[in-house]
Image (cartoon, grey):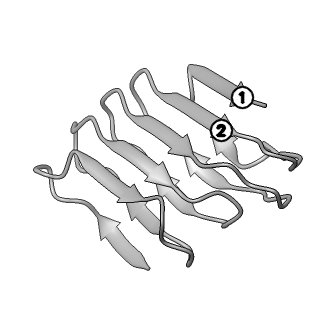
Amino acid sequence: MTLGTLSTSTTVLDASAFTPIVSATGGAATATTFTLKGGVVHNVTGSTAADTFSISTSNSNTAYNIDGGAGTDTLTLNMGTATFTDTNVDNFEVINYVV
């Protein structure tokens, strides 16, 4: 699902139960909470504010395309039994791995 740039009134994007790829960019200077399903190669970019990303448990190896953007951003990744490649994970000041 390609959402493009989110409205500045959108502060939460919950795609935790959505299996297809989510492509979205946070609205300008709007802190956004992104909740994404694990095991899917999402293409998501945060805003210039402090964004929070959470990716649910995955039991498949996935190379996510996640960019925190500017601001102080946090990523929480629930690992399950998967391995994680972070070559396309950028601009996070805090990354929490839950094993």
Label 1 belongs to which residue? 97
Q: Specify which label sits upstream in the sequence, 1 or 2.
A: 2
Decide if residue 69 is in sight here.
no
- Location of residue 79 (image quadrant): top right
- Location of residue 3 (image quadrant): bottom left
Q: Is residue 5 above or below residue 84?
A: below
Q: Secondary structure at mark 1?
A: strand
Q: Residues within 10 Å of mark 2 (few under 14, many from 20)?
A: many
Which residue shows up at 24% across the image and 50% down it? Answer: 27
Left/right placement of residue 79 relative to residue 2 reads: right
In x, y percent, where is residue 46? 41, 44
Query: What whole-number distance in Å separates the C-alpha atoms at marks 1 and 2?
Result: 5 Å
Q: Secondary structure at mark 2?
A: strand
Q: Residues within 10 Å of mark 1 (few under 14, many from 20)?
A: few
Which residue shows up at 44% across the image and 80% down it? Answer: 1
- How many numbered marks, from 0 up? 2
The amino acid on which the numbered mark 2 sits, given as a three-letter code, is Leu
Tell me, for residue 41, which label it has, or none.
none
Label 2 belongs to which residue? 77
